[in-house]
Amino acid sequence: MPELRYIGKPARRVDAVEKVTGRAKYVGDRKLPGMLHARCLRAEVPHARIVRLDVTPALAVPGVCAVITSEDYFENGLYGFPVKDKYMLAHQKVRYVGEAIAAVAAETPEAAIKGVEAIICELEPLPGLFDPEQSLLPGAPQVGPDRPDGKHPNFLDSLIVRKGDPLAEWAKCEVKLEEKYSVVPQEHAYIEPEGALAIPTREGGVVVYAPNQSPFVNQGNLALVLDLPHNLVRIIQPPVGGSFGGKDDQIYETSAQVAKLALKAGRPVRMVFGREESLWRGPRRHAPRVQIRRPARLRRVRVGEPLHRVAREHPRDGRVPV
């Protein structure tokens, strides 16, 4: 029998040597000639109407090359799954602390910060919504936009997984235990903060380096909001310095921001979060509230556990149903 090449033998990770020797290039390590640095103006209140947004003063700041708002995207940058209810930059109102309102690209990080500080933004505070179980009650503040399917704007989606008839079995059981549990949010705390690098192409498209979890989803979102065919949007996956579920939607928005800035300025644009920005803007693990019923018969046979889970679907995260 010939000697096997792989089965029964240790396998080496393809990226192990580059990472342990420090040669791996993350987004923050990549620099290109003529590259601009980007920063975002972010909301400091959880819910507010955008009364005035004037980016003209930012363009007067020395070193600032481009500024964008939701008006620069197709359909104002609307995207999302399973419901399109999010924006690459806040449109008409902000819906959480840290939501990006405008983005600036400049010759230096310092000039980008000064450009952000020069933007005139007036917000009218609106009532906040902080309890998922209150979100569908009459009179609850409307966070999401109106839905074409007629469902409540604060509702995202539901998923029912059922085997057999659990309610019928529940009625037959002599022992019935019912408990409610809650889990607190959790910061992912990955070593590499969020970031993306965009490079405009001669064909009018864009190449984006981003630490995605789902690069093809990123490509589809960018093609949508930039109004480009998919073949003009290329996503390159560099090494990812940790994610744990946290680099989905935030990376899509950061990618869209640097991509539009790059197309507008005609130069490469990179945005990399600092640790503070990552902590107060980045997503968290959801804080679900779970109701579990534990039925059993006296002959000690557990027959099933009907479970009801309600999760706070934060406006910054668009892929986990409520």
Image (cartoon, helix red, strand yellow):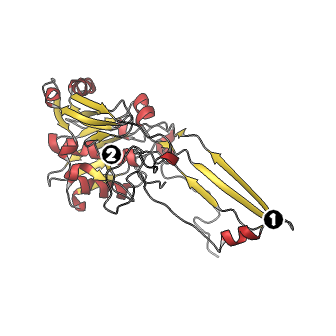
| 164 displayed left or right of 272 | right
View extreme (bottom): residue: 1
For the point 17% across and 28% down, the residue is: 58
Question: Which numbered marker is on residue 174?
Answer: 1
Q: Residue at x 84, y 65 (%)?
A: 300
Horizontal relation, residue 84 to residue 140: left or right: left
Residue appearing at x 46%, y 43% in the figure? 18
How far apart marks 2 and 1 lie (CA) works out to 52 Å
Q: Return the residue nearer the eye: 93 or 195.
A: 93
Query: Residue 143, located in which quarter of the rendered image?
Result: top left
Q: Could one spot residue 128 in this view of the protein? A: yes
Marker disc for residue 253:
2
Q: Does 74 sit above or below residue 261?
A: below
Residue 83: which numbered mark, if any?
Answer: none
Callout count: 2
Nearer the observer: mark 2 or 1; the answer is 1
Residue 256 position in % (x across, y down): 28, 46
Is residue 31 at least partly visible in the picture? no
Q: Name the one closer to the observer, 235 or 160.
A: 160
Secondary structure type for disc 1: loop
Q: Residues within 10 Å of mark 2 (few under 14, many from 20)?
A: many
Of 196 and 61, the residue lying toward us: 61
Image location of residue 205, percent across then percent down: 19, 53
Task: Tell me the crowding category of disc 1: few under 14, some 14 to 19, or many 20 or more residues within 10 angstroms, Cα based.
Answer: few
Q: The disc labelled 1 sits on which kind of residue?
A: Glu
Q: Which is nearer the N-term, disc 2 or disc 1?
A: 1
Asked whether the residues under the numbered discs 2 and 1 touch, taking CB atoms below 8 Å apart as contact, a structural biologist would say: no
At x 29% / y 32%, what residue is drawn?
124
**Secondary structure under the numbered disc 2 in the rendered image:** helix
- In this picture, is 280 found above or below 217? above
With 252 as the anchor, is 116 left or right in this view? left
